[in-house]
Amino acid sequence: MQVFDRTRHWDQIYRTKKLEDVSWYQPDPVTSLAFVEELKIGPEARVIDIGGGDSLLVDRLLDRGYRNLSVLDISAAAINRAKERLGERAAAVEWIVADAADFHPTERYDFWHDRAAFHFLTDEEEIERYLATARESLVPGGALVIGTFSEQGPDKCSGIRVKQYSQDSMTRRLSASFEKIKCIQVDHRTPAATLQNFVFCSFRKS
């Protein structure tokens, strides 16, 4: 049986589809930016965007004067597209090509953001490793925001089965190391005009 190669899968997608054509495309990441404001994540904060790929959150944070930004993605093709789009501004960002389940940070962060990467982890061991990494790499009192497909959302994305969460199941999953701040559910309208229901939860490292 052939082992599924996540890196190859995502590189292929980013090499063949335009930014505006992928289902997760957002011209303006309003939900994520609202959490940044609510959590009072200032421009000097050390921020990491997990699974950020070539999404536009990093652009918007740079626009707002954020200076300590890191973007992690499993796909080098996605990272390269983001760098090309940002041009000279790309030098202000730390770019990390790694699988979120096997990431070994070399620094600590004030804010950990993940929109639609965590739900691709369906293996219990990988989920535990991811959460342990988030816990260990956040400073005391650091904040974390995770957005996944809700139980009313899709059960697959880009041909890969995902793990759906409710507000309660997300809170329970992280309760050992994080204190919940708030959870919301939002609909994301894809470029194909379909709706995907997400649950977003914010937490503070306890």
Image (cartoon, helix red, strand yellow):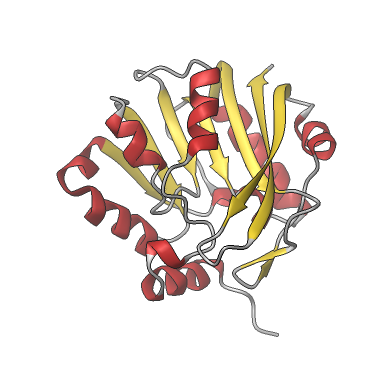
Which residue ends up furthest to the front in the rendered image?
Answer: 193
92 with respect to 41 (left or right): left
Image spot of residue 5 (x, y percent): 56, 72
Q: Residue furthest left?
A: 88
Q: Residue at x 47, y 41 (%)?
A: 29
Most extreme residue toward the bottom, as rendered? 1
| Residue 170 rendering spot, x and y as whole percentages | 77, 37
Residue 17: percent from the left, percent from the top?
A: 41, 72
Q: Taking 66 as reference, is 151 above or below it?
A: below
Would residue 102 be found to the left or right of residue 14 on screen?
right
Q: Quadrant of residue 153?
A: bottom right
Q: How many marks?
A: 0
Residue 192 versus residue 92 in the image, above or below: below
Q: Quadrant of the C terminus?
A: top right
Vertical arrangement, residue 143 with respect to residue 89, above or below: above
Task: Please name whichever residue, 82 or 135, is drawn nearer the observer in this view of the structure.
Answer: 82
Viewer-nearest residue: 165 or 153: 153
Residue appearing at x 66%, y 24% in the figure:
203
The residue lying at 70 percent from left, 85 percent from top is 1
